[in-house]
Image (cartoon, helix red, strand yellow):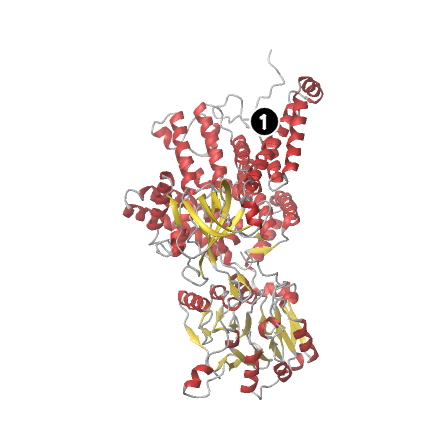
Amino acid sequence: MTDMTRPVVHAASGHRLGASDPRQEGPADLRLVPPALAAWAAAALAVGARGWWTAVGVTACLVVAAVLLAPAVVRAVGAVTRVRGRGLNATAVAALLLCAAAGAASAGLHGADLRRGPLPALADQYAYVTVELTVTSDPRTTRPRIRGDHMSATSIVLDGEATRVTAPGGAVTAIRTPVLVIVPSRKPGDSGDSGDSGGSGSSAGPGAQWQRLLPSTRLRLAGRLAPPLNADDRFAAVLRAQGGGPPQIIGPPTALQRTAGGLRAGLREATDGLDPDARALLPGLVVGDTSRIPPDLHDAFEATDLTHLLAVSGSNLTIVLVLLIGPPGTALLAERRGLAPRLGITLRGTALIGGALTLAFVVVCRPEPSVLRAAGCGLITLLAIATGRRRSLIPALAAAVLLLVLYDPWLARSYGFLLSVLATGALLTIGPGLSAALQRRRVPPRLAETLAAAAAAQAVCAPVVAIFAARVSLVAIPCNLVAELAVAPATVLGFAALAATPLAIPVAEVLARCAGWPAGWIASVARTGAALPGAQAGWPGGWRGGLLLAAVTALVVLVARRLPRHPWAAVGCALLLLLAVLRPAPLTRVVTGWPPPGWTFVMCDVGQGDATVLAAGEGAAVVVDAGPDPELADRCLRDLGITRIPLILLTHFHADHVRGLPGLLRGRAVGAVQTTTFDEPREQSTFVRRTAAAAGVPVIRAGPEERRRVGRLAWQVLWPRAAPGPGPTRASALVPDGPNDASVTLLVRIAGGPTLLLLGDLEPPAQRGLLSTHPALPPVDVLKVAHHGSSHQHPGLLRNVRPRLALISCGRNNFYGHPSPRTVDALRTGGAVVLRTDTDGAIAVTGGGADLRAVPRGQGSGPDPPPF
C-alpha cells in the first residue's frame, strides 16, 4: 500500500521525485558547521591566552566529552532528546567539545612555541643579537606614516623562522622561533614613494635586493630585538636589522620557491609596458604581488570595498577550478562540465589535476587567508570527486575552516580569513534564496545571481569592516557588480600570461596586454566610485559599531522585502541613496548647513597639519597648504564644491603641509603650484615636484613682496624677506634656520570681506624678522596662528596684528600638545576669539567688518596615527 504521508514533491527542490534534474539535496547539510565554529571560537580565545587557562579549558572539554560519550549516558540522553531521529544529542555535543578542545590545544601549542627558547627573554631586554633565520614570507614595504611634520622612513618587513641565535655574551642556541624582521629601506620621498610606487625590483640597490628575497632563503642578520606590540602576535620578537647593506644570504631558496619566484618575476616583466593602474593591479590580482600598488589606488579600493580584488584571493582559484570542472552549481550533479570531460579526463584524473593546480596556486600566490580557505574548499571538493561521493559545498567550507584553524590557529583572529569565510558562506546560503526572490520578480537569472551574490557578501561583510575601519561604503554593491564583469577575463588572461613567461616573454607580454584591459577597467571602477562625494560614510568602530551595523542591515533587509509591494516607496529609497552618494552641493548645503552661504575662508579639518581655502569665485579657490592626508584634503574641497584651483601655495615642505597634494589635484583644474625657495626637507620637495609633474601642473617659486590677485582676492608675500643687497650677505640672508622659518607668509585682503594673515609655521626668530621688515603691519580680522598654536610665538607680533579671530589647525589628542594653553590665553587676552580644528572641526569665515562670523562645522579630527 502506498504511503500517503510521503510528499510527492521534494520540499527543498521544487521538483517531483524522479525528475531528470531534481537537485534533490534536501535541506543544507550543516552538521559540520557547529564543530568548525567551536574549533574557531576556541582557537581565537586561546591564541595569546595564558597557558594554564588553555590547559584548564582543554581538560574540561575532554572530561565532559568523555562523560557524554559513555554508553549509558549516550542511551539515556539520546532517549530523552532524540526527536524523529534528529536534534541535539550527546554525540553532537561531545563532537563540539572535542573540536573546541582541539582548537584550543592547537592554539596553546603554537603559543608555547613562541615562548620557548632564549629569544623572548632577549627581546624583553632589547638585546643586540646575531640571528640565522629562514624567510617564510615575501618581503613587503611598509606604507610611510606622517608623524607631525615628519614622515617615517619606508621599511621592508618580512616573516622568518629563527634557527640559531647568538646572544650578547656569545652563547649560541639552536632554536625554531618565528620572528618579524624590519629592515630600513629608504627615506620617504625617494623613488617609488609617490603616486606610482611601482618599481618592479629592477634597481640594483640594497632595498631591491631585500625585496627580491624568496621564502625558504636562509639569512644571517645582526640587529636589536624588541618584544611584539601585542600578546597575540604570531611572532616571538621583532628584529630590527642594522646597517643599510644587502642581505647576507647563507642558503639559497628551494627549487620550488625559485620556480614560483621566477614566475612572479616573469609576470612583472610582462606587465612593464602596461598603463600604470593595470601594471600595478594585474600582478596583485593574479599572484598577490602588491609591490606596485600606489597608496591612492589602495585607498580607492578600500573606499569601494573592492580590496578582495586588490590582491589574489580565493575567487581566483575558484575561476581556475571552474574552467576545469565546471561552475559550482554542478558540484551537486553527476554530469560534469568544464574542460576535463571534454578532454576525456577521468574523475580521478580530474581530481589529481585540480589538486596539483590548487597546490601550485598556493605556492605561487602565497598562503594568504582567503587563498587557504579557497584551497581547502577546493581540495575537499576534489577529494569528493575522486571518491565518487556527493559534493556539497557548505560541508566543504566547514571542513576547510576546521582543518585550517587546527593547522594555523592565528587564522582564527584574522580579519581576512573571517571576511573570506563570511563572503563564501553568504554566497552559499543567502545568495540562492535572494537570487530566487529576484527571479520571481522577473529579474533575468544571470543578473539575479550576480546581484544576489554582491548583496549577500556585502550584507555579512560590512559589519566586520566597520569594526576595524569605522566606515561604511555606500557604493560597494554597484562597484562590485560593475567590476565583476572584468574579474574572470583579467584572471584567466593573467594566468595565461603567467604560464607563458617561462616559454616566451613576447607571448606573455601580448597576453598581459590583453589582461591589462580588464584590469584597468577594475581600477577605473575603484577610482570612479571612490571619487564620488558620498562613496563612504563614517560609522562607529569596534564591536559596538559592528553589531549596530548588523542590526541596521537586518532592518534594511526586512524593509527591502516589502518595498516591491510599494513601488513609489522603492523609488523614493533609491533616490535618497543616490542623493547620499552624489551629494549635490546645493542639497548638501541645505541639509548640513555646510558650507555656510557667502564663505570667504575655510580652515580644513585635516588633523595635525594645515590646509586652508580662499574663495575665488563660483567653484574656484586658492588653496594654501595641503595637509598630511590626500583623502582629507580632497574631502574638504569636495564639501566646498571646489573644482578649479588657480593656485596652490605650499608654505614650506614639511610633510603635514604637502603630503595631501595628490588629493587637491584629484579631478580638479589646477593652474600652478607655488612653493617657498627653501628646498628642505629634500625628500618632500622632490615629492611635490614629482606629484605636480605627474599631473601636468607647473611649479613656481614665491618671490619676496610678490603681489597677486584672483577675483575678490588680493595678497602680498610678506616672508621670506628679500636679501638686503648684492654680495656675500645676500646668500646668507636667504638661508633660514629651518623649513619652518622659510614659511611663505601672506597678507590677504578680500574685497568686501576680512583681512587675513597666514603665518605658516613661522618660529619666533622669523616672526620677529617679519615684524621688523613690516613695522607698519596693520591689525587683521583673521589670524592663522603659526605652527598649530605651539608655545613658540613672538608676543610682539600677536600684539601688533590684534586679530579678531584666531584659527588654529591641529589634530585631536596630538602628541605635541598643540595648541599650547599659553598661546591660547595670550590670544584671548588680546581680544581674539580662538577656534581650533581639533575641537571645532573645519571652520568657515563669512562676512566682514561688523558682520564677521566664524562658523565651525563640528567635531574635530582624530589623533595622528601611531608610527609603524
Residue that mark 1 sits on: 11
Would you say residue 434 is visible in this rendering?
no
The residue type indicated by label 1 comes to: Ala
**What quarter of the picture does the N terminus occupy?**
top right
Would you say residue 265 is visible in this rendering?
yes
362 on left or right of 842: left
661 on left or right of 341: right
The picture quadrant where one finds residue 752 is bottom right
Quick check: 838 above or below 481? below
**Rendered residue at 57%/21% (across/down):** 8
Q: What kind of element bears circle 1?
A: loop
Quick check: 490 above or below 823? above
Counting from the top left corner in percent of width and height, residue 98 is at 61, 28
99, 708: nearer the viewer: 99
How many numbered marks appear? 1
Tell me if mark 1 has few (under 14), some (14-19) or many (20+) residues whose alpha carbon lies within 10 angstroms of its own: few
672, 40: nearer the viewer: 40
The picture quadrant where one finds residue 492 is top left
Counting from the top left corner in percent of width and height, residue 48 is at 60, 42
776 on left or right of 502: right
Counting from the top left corner in percent of width and height, residue 736 is at 49, 78
**Outermost residue, top direction?**
1
Counting from the top left corner in percent of width and height, residue 238 is at 52, 50
